[in-house]
Image (cartoon, helix red, strand yellow):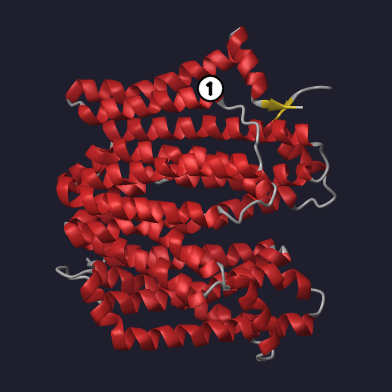
């Protein structure tokens, strides 16, 4: 069959041998700059927890949830439709310009409509959802409206540059939004001694000062035109996206809303610290997936099915090894180091991180079990998975959070994420019946989960020992893969022809 090389080597070789010399560069840029918003959250994390109260940090967490929701509503799936139909019009400048301005004007109209509804009903909706708290539509909902709208239009321009493969301008937009928002928020906290409200105003001002001049530059030579034919086509595509996106939003954010409702905004702040640390696993999984999966999709067009299965399993095992390393480092760091970085009022966040890591570990298997569906375009049933997540999260949060506090929120997250795996696997077996070869990943994650549980239920020196075990396991597992005969056999399963 020829010489064996790693999945990563094939990925790099595929790009190197490709006639387009931009592929390696573009993959790095799209991966790196695409995750700058998450990088901003991590960069600001130590500043937030040091200088903001738990209540202010909780308000920022709830505001981020509202920004996410308003982005879905204001864009109404048109941003996804733009990316889908861009390639149909890109060779005709006149049609492409008309399509861009039609999408932008439609988003402006939808935003105005929702804002008018917000002015009329927003205060009452916020009072009903967040009753008993100080989180109100004015100013926090209003701030979220501004930030969401600015982000949508700027993201649309960024998408245009990405589809155009204009890496320079794509990078400028991504770096500009990241720099302005991060610098303004940092200045608001460190220099002005700001609270949550002022920090959010600083973010809105920062991204607006960069984005609005860039809009003028981008649209300066584009004639303004609205064509109903384009919007009719776009809505046919984006119609199903909106409920799907809202389900994802609820799946990701309902726990914070329930914590604010049943506990307090201060509890949301503490929980947000723990979630920020644990969600690094999600970030790493998505970065690795975005970096390696393009080669897998490209090989789908040129290799027989056996080769695709072998390639996919190679990808799954590389992803599993990286996920294990990330999880073990987070467990170790949160136990040994985090209490030196956060004030004592966030100590409860440190206590529940081991439980949250269990829930986030399930993301690896969720990604693995869903990959065949995307590979072979069997995605119609995926919304059922998200609907299941929302139902389980709602029911479990309603019971566990009022009775067990933030520990209950962590338990609810674990139940929700692991409840998705059986239904995902059933759907996958019915639609693709993929031959997974990841047995050692099951064992490795079982070790991690047991150690997380032991860490949570232990104190003092015992807690530190249990937190160290997954990292030691990873080291010995790596040595085993590289040196022993059985390990080399396992290593071959992590390679592709």
Q: Residues within 10 Å of mark 1 (few under 14, many from 20)?
A: few
Residue 48, above or below 226 = above
Residue at image x 60%, y 39%? 429
Q: Which residue is mark 1?
A: 440
**Is residue 51 rendered to the left or right of residue 482?**
left
Q: Quadrant of residue 352?
A: top left
- Callout 1: SS: helix
Q: Nearer the viewer, residue 328 or 496?
A: 496
Q: Is residue 365 visible?
A: yes
Percent across and percent down for residue 399 are 22, 50
Residue 396, above or below 484 = below
**Is residue 32 rendered to the left or right of residue 330?**
right
Q: Is residue 57 visible?
A: no
Numbered marks: total: 1
Percent across and percent down for residue 258 are 25, 58
Q: Nearer the viewer, residue 26 or 444?
A: 444
Percent across and percent down for residue 156 are 59, 72
**Is residue 171 rendered to the left or right of residue 347?**
right
Residue at image x 34%, y 76%? 143
Q: Quadrant of residue 200?
A: bottom left
Residue at image x 63%, y 65%? 170
Percent across and percent down for residue 435 are 65, 31
Residue 430, above or below 390 = above
Residue at image x 50%, y 42%? 366
The residue sitting at the front extreme is: 430
Q: Nearer the viewer, residue 425 or 299?
A: 425
């Amino acid at each position: 069959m020829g010489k064996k090389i790693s999945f990563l080597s094939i990925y790099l070789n595929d790009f190197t041998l490709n006639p387009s010399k931009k592929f390696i560069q573009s993959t790095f840029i799209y991966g790196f700059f695409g995750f700058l918003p998450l990088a901003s959250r991590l960069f600001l994390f130590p500043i937030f927890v040091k200088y903001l109260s738990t209540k202010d940090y909780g308000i920022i967490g709830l505001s981020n949830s509202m920004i996410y929701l308003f982005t879905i509503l204001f864009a109404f799936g048109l941003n996804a439709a733009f990316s889908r139909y861009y390639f149909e019009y890109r060779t005709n400048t006149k049609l492409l310009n008309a399509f861009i301005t039609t999408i932008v004007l439609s988003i402006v109209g939808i935003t105005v409509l929702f804002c008018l509804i917000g002015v009329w009903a927003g205060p009452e909706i916020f009072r009903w959802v967040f009753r008993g708290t100080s989180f109100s539509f004015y100013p926090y909902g209003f701030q979220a409206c501004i930030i969401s709208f600015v982000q949508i239009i700027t993201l649309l321009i960024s998408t245009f540059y990405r589809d155009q493969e204009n890496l320079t301008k794509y990078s400028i937009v991504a770096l500009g939004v990241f720099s302005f928002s991060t610098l303004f928020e940092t200045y608001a906290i460190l220099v002005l001694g700001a609270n949550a409200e002022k920090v959010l105003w600083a973010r809105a001002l920062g991204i607006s000062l960069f984005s609005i001049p860039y809009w003028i530059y981008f649209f300066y030579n584009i004639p303004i035109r609205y064509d109903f034919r384009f919007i009719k086509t776009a809505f046919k595509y984006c119609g199903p996206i909106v409920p799907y996106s809202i389900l994802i939003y609820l799946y990701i954010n309902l726990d914070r809303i329930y914590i604010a409702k049943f506990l307090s905004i201060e509890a949301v702040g503490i929980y947000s610290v723990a979630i920020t640390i644990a969600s690094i696993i999600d970030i790493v999984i998505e970065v690795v997936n975005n970096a390696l999966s393009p080669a897998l999709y490209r090989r789908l067009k040129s290799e027989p099915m056996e080769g695709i299965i072998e390639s996919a399993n190679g990808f799954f095992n590389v992803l599993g090894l990286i996920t294990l390393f990330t999880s073990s480092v987070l467990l170790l760091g949160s136990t040994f180091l985090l209490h030196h970085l956060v004030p004592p009022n966030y100590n409860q966040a440190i206590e529940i991180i081991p439980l949250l890591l269990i829930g986030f570990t399930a993301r690896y298997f969720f990604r693995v079990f869903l990959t065949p569906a995307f590979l072979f375009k069997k995605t119609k049933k995926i919304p059922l998975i998200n609907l299941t997540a929302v139902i389980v999260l709602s029911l479990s949060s309603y019971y566990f959070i009022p009775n067990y506090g933030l520990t209950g929120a962590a338990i609810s997250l674990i139940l929700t994420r692991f409840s998705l795996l059986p239904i995902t696997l059933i759907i996958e077996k019915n639609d693709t019946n993929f031959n997974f070869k990841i047995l050692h990943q099951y064992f490795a994650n079982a070790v991690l989960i047991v150690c997380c549980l032991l860490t949570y239920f232990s104190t003092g020196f015992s807690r530190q020992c249990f937190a160290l075990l997954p990292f030691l396991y990873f080291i010995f597992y790596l040595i085993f893969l590289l040196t022993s005969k059985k390990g080399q056999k396992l290593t071959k399963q992590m390679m592709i022809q």
